[in-house]
Amino acid sequence: MKIFYDHIYGNTTKYDIIYGLALAEVEKDEEEKALSLGWTPMDAFFYQTDKQLWIQARTTRISLDDYTLKKKHRQYNKREITGGYYPDNNPYQKECDVIFEKYVKYKGYDDHGSELVDKEYGNKDYFVYMHNDKIIAYTQLTRFNKSVVAGEFAWDYENPELSLGTVAQNFECTLYQHIGFKYYYSSYAYENVCEYKSHYNGFEWWTGREWSKDKELFRDLLSKDSKVESLKDLYYRHKDYYKELNKNGKECLQ
């Protein structure tokens, strides 16, 4: 693994802030180890790179050894949603492209098509979800030995009551658990919008030093992320972060 750093921004006159990214080039025999140390494949389109790079971040995962379906999630099984699992090839790619276009339009994102899907790393898995004989959602993931990384989930935004994100993740975790996988990685998490990631049994998150099961602390960090709206806010968040580290001697901070 080759680790390097992009020093993108700094403000040391008014605020003592240095902003950079920790990145890595990961060899194929190092992928599982990289995941276990908090690295995750980057969004290649956003970072405008033709290489598959990995980023160090507040990543999240489900330990499938500890995963069980929550009682409140069992009701979703009654909504007549069917899921299909397709290793290596998606037979419904055209239909999924239409859903992706709806997803991009609803979210207001730039349409980068399937560029992320085609990166040469890992083996791709596809899940396609149907309701009333109509394709309404899909997930594209990447397999790494006994771990899987969720890469792209999109749905048609026509029936929010179906709770398709929850249905899909539970379906996928159950299947991967059944076939012997150890971890379901669900990318990184910042701000309150990512609080849903902690709703599953077996949830863990990377502190930067270790994997934690502390959901309360995780949610507190997300809340503090969402309060940062300026460099001044970031400066004081930075100071408070290390103040807590020095005070408590903890690996993860409040």
Image (tube, helix red, strand yellow):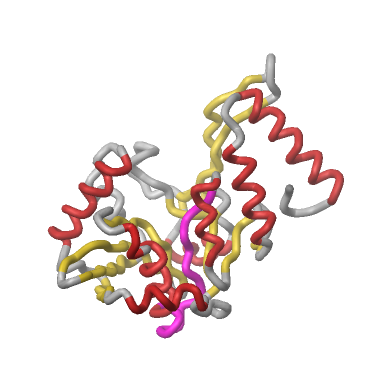
Provide residue 83's location: percent of width, then percent of height.
Answer: 28, 74
Q: Quick one: 101 or 88, which is closer to the camera?
A: 101
Which residue is situated farthest in the right direction here?
247
User: In the shown orientation, is residue 245 left or right of residue 226?
Assistant: right
User: In the shown orientation, is residue 87 left or right of residue 70?
Assistant: left
User: In the shown orientation, is residue 27 left or right of residue 45?
Assistant: right
Is 77 located above or below residue 231 in the figure? below
Q: Within the image, what quadrant is residue 124 found in?
A: bottom left
Q: Is residue 141 visible?
A: no
Question: Residue drawn at (69%, 15%), measured in percent from left and top?
Answer: 14
Q: Is residue 86 visible?
A: yes
Question: Residue drawn at (65%, 47%), measured in percent from left and top?
Answer: 221
Which residue is situated farthest in the left direction here?
94
The residue segment tinted magenta is 176-189
User: In the shown orientation, is residue 131 left or right of residue 121?
Assistant: left
Q: Within the image, what quadrant is residue 140 found in?
A: bottom left
Question: Residue drawn at (58%, 78%), measured in percent from left and top?
Answer: 66
Provide residue 91's location: percent of width, then percent of height.
Answer: 15, 69
Q: Is 186 covered by the magenta stretch?
A: yes
Q: Is 156 covered by the magenta stretch?
A: no
Provide residue 254's location: percent of width, then percent of height.
Answer: 73, 48
Which residue is situated farthest in the top direction here?
13
Question: Residue drawn at (64%, 54%), measured in percent from left and top?
Answer: 218
Q: Quick one: 131 or 114, which is closer to the camera?
A: 131
Provide residue 251's location: percent of width, then percent of height.
Answer: 75, 54
Is 88 located above or below residue 27 in the figure? below
